[in-house]
Image (tube, rainbow, N blue to C red):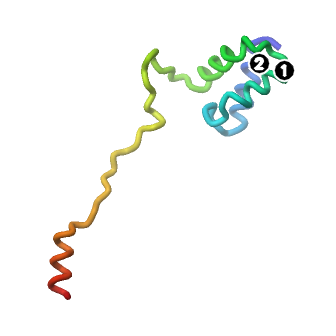
Amino acid sequence: MNTKELLTTLSDAVTASGKSLGEIGKDPIFEYLKRSEIPKNLWEGLYEKLQHLHNPKSQPVGGVDYSETTHSDVKHREPRKKLFSEIKKIAG
């Protein structure tokens, strides 16, 4: 099996799993490569190529990708304590 066929097979398996490559991780990919008797010195390169296939937005060298950790800035509103304490004094 050549590199292109191997990458296609791995990419199809990742897509069929319904998970992202990050959720799957390296271990299952490397286990498959081991069973397929692919030389160990090629594993990292194949995994990087697989990452580029599934994450086309490659981050710049030395850059940090915050896309998955970005949260919307929704303010959590608290009731005004002074207002409610005044209501309790009047009502109580």
Task: Describe residue 65's horizontal placement relative to residue 88 as left or right.
Answer: right
Residue corresponding to mark 1:
36
Give the position of the N terminus as an image quadrant. top right
Q: Which residue of the protein is positioned furthest toward the bottom in this rendering?
A: 92
Q: Which of 20 and 40 is in front in this view?
A: 40
Q: Residue at x 19, y 87 (%)?
A: 91
Kindly identify which numbered label has been placed on residue 6: 2
Q: Nearer the viewer, residue 58 or 44?
A: 44
- For mark 2, give the secondary structure: helix
Tell which circle, 2 or 1, labels the residue nearer the N-terminal end: 2
Give the position of the C terminus as an image quadrant. bottom left
Q: Which amino acid does label 1 sit on?
A: Ser
Q: Residues within 10 Å of mark 2 (few under 14, many from 20)?
A: some
Task: Describe residue 66's horizontal placement relative to residue 82 as left or right.
Answer: right
Q: Which residue is drawn at 84% across and 17% down?
A: 37
Task: Describe residue 39's horizontal placement relative to residue 81 as left or right.
Answer: right
Task: Describe residue 60's horizontal placement relative to residue 73 as left or right.
Answer: right
Q: Residue at x 73, y 11 (%)?
A: 41
Residue 80: x and y in percent read 21, 66
Residue 5: x and y in percent read 77, 17
Q: What residue type is labelled 2?
A: Leu
Q: How many marks?
A: 2
Mark in the foreground, 2 or 1 = 1
Whole-number angstrom distance, CA of label 2 to CA of label 1: 10 Å
Picture quadrant of residue 47: top right
The reply to whether callout 2 and callout 1 are in contact (CB within 8 Å) is yes
Q: Which residue is drawn at 19% across and 76% down?
A: 85
Residue 17: x and y in percent read 71, 38
